[in-house]
Image (spheres, rainbow, N blue to C red):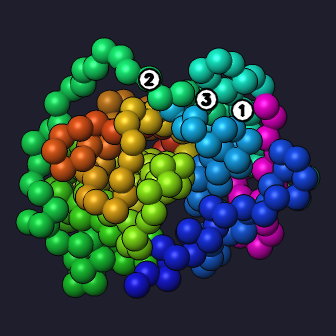
Amino acid sequence: MSARARQLLDLVRLERIEDNIWRGQNEARNGAPLFGGQVLAQALAAASATVDASRPCHSLHGYFLRPGKTDTPVIYLVEPIRNGKSFSTRRIVAIQYGEAIFSMDASFHDREPGLAHQLDMLAVPGPETLVDDRTIGASSEDPDQQWAMRERPFEVRSVYQRGTPATKVTSFPSWIRFLEPVTDDQHLHRYLLAYASDMNLVATARQPHRDTVSRSEVRMASLDHAIWFHHDINVNDWLVYIKESPQGGAGRGFNRGAFYTRDGQRVASTIQEGLMRVVQKTADKA
């Protein structure tokens, strides 16, 4: 049983304060700012609570405006922009201490049939052939490996461990699976995938530079985040999250990712730009 997984399930059960106003509690971060994945998941939960349950979210686009703090709950204000015949749109603002820390637009779509195609999944080893990141981190003195030791609500098995020479590799595939059984509530599976979508995505932009710049020399933070849900999600089974960084520069790294099932169905896509500032060479401006 995973305490962190059970905690995350509690965190996405928001407290209703008033119509379109919700309050969410925070996970402990040992002095670090709020994890962006938590805010994404809770913002999506707040928005979903104002939409008919038969209409799941198909896309969301968010901006991280200020670092969130763990010492006070987050207030989520939901603005119902539109309820159409097949689409609903919501605008969400997350607030702490009277200031917006995050804003997001989310769109919801009735289920309907249509033409289908996808890019094939990258050929990667199956999760059964890999070792959990926390196990590898426990036996390594590499700070990057030890970072993987932190407890998370998902089990993660990375295809390329952080000790692997970078050699300009820009892809970072990992298998993930939620550590507690989840009911068939498709909204809940989307909340949990939203959380997982922010795990190590911003760090993907550092992959090509791992041999020359250590983690302690780079300040990284998510700036924006988008998710498209293509099919129903099942976080009870392994999903491979294939992340890559097509471009980096100007103090920012651009990342994108795709979630695939074991049988190769692409169920979700992500795009994120993040701060990637070399702190030893550039004055801290953020």
Query: Is label 2 or label 1 in front?
Result: 2
To which residue does mark 2 refer? 112
What label sits on residue 90 in the rendered view?
Answer: 1
Q: Is there a contact, CB below 8 Å, between mark 2 and mark 1?
A: no
Q: Residue at x 56, y 68 (%)?
A: 9
* Image height of 273 relative to 212, above or below: above
Q: Quadrant of residue 107?
A: top right
- Res 197 visible: yes
Question: Which residue is identified by label 3?
Answer: 107
SS type, badge 3: strand
Q: Are marks 3 and 2 in contact (CB under 8 Å)?
A: no
Examine the structure image and report whether residue 70 is included in the region drawn in magenta: yes
- Is the residue marked by circle 2 packed among few (<14), some (14-19), or many (20+) residues within 10 Å? few
Q: Position of residue 199 (x, y in %)?
A: 43, 56
Identify the magenta region: 66-80
Residue 286: % across, % down: 68, 46
